[in-house]
Amino acid sequence: MKGWIYAIVAALLVSAAGYGGFLMGHDSADIRARGEKIKLEQKITALQTEVEQLRKNAAEREEGDVAVQDHDGLIRWFRTTDDKGVGIEHTPEELLALTQNPENRDYKQVLKRFVSEALGKEIASFQTASRTLNPREVLVMTTDHEALQIHMKKWSNYDQIWTVTGYNNLFPASENLDPVQRYRTLKMGDAPQPVQEWASKLLGTPEWQQAFTTQDGKTYILLKTSSSPTDSVEVEDIGIWANEMYVDYHRYEFGKSADPSLINDYLLLEADYPADRGVRFTETYAYRE
């Protein structure tokens, strides 16, 4: 952006200088004419005004970009500050009660509800800031320009629900991107019967699997681990382009001492659009103890 602004500025200045030189070197009678002098002065003044406005606009855009795009700076501040914010613990009884609401299996729904109900704010945008997806660190920008660092955990031994385990806040920031829910995590019993039968056959195999099927205009995706009880899988994101779906996922191979609540031996996902041209799976991160 900055480069082309300065290119335009240079071109306008050269154009102004060239135009003035042309008139000054042309027929002397025309140059002495007062009307031509006034036109020349007006044209150069207009060009100078336009140049100054371009420079001003460029400077304003650069200042705005720093405020909007410096997510890395916010993350570094959160991770280095001595103030670690507020921690949140849940009893087994609370976790069991949370399993009754299927929305709690979608971290985006849990995140939105927490920001709205617990903090009294509205999300303008958010992004995952951690390398791991479970536990997950999320950087949130609110509509009143506050930055939030929110820690979340998914409990595989409590029906795959998500909870907020802590949060911290920071100085004002701004962003204008609304989050869009593109997929959902399903329990096996919530999937259509043909999808359950398809997934059950794959779950009986001992190796890692990435597969998909379609049903009633929707796409169902299965990510499963090996037969090892400490292998786990997490979905990073799902997108679609030209009727082809892209699934990015993380593979974890924990040791025997792994926290059981972090283990997902499989994930069954539902997306609201058909992948007519297929699904492309990409392992974007692998962890092995």
Image (tube, helix red, strand yellow):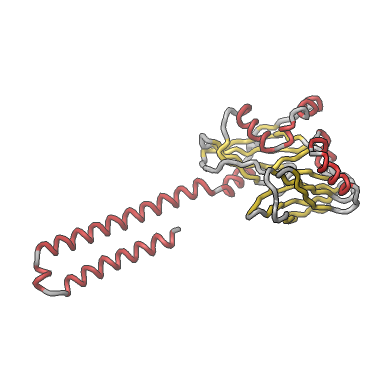
Q: In the rendered image, which quarter contains the N terminus?
A: bottom left
Report the front residue among 70 and 284: 284
Residue at 19%, 58% in the rendered image: 42
Residue at 85%, 44% in the rendered image: 258
Total residue callouts: 0
Location of residue 4 with respect to 113 vertically, above or below: below
Q: Position of residue 85 (x, y in %)?
A: 64, 34
The quadrant in which residue 8 appears is: bottom left
Q: Position of residue 130 (x, y in %)?
A: 68, 46
Report whether 107 appears left or right of 120.
right
Report whether 96 appears left or right of 106.
right
Report the front residue among 197 and 2: 197
Q: Position of residue 238 (x, y in %)?
A: 68, 49
The quadrant in which residue 19 appears is: bottom left
Report the front residue among 157 and 220: 220
Location of residue 45 with respect to 93 vertically, above or below: below
Residue at 65%, 46% in the rendered image: 129
Residue at 28%, 67% in the rendered image: 15
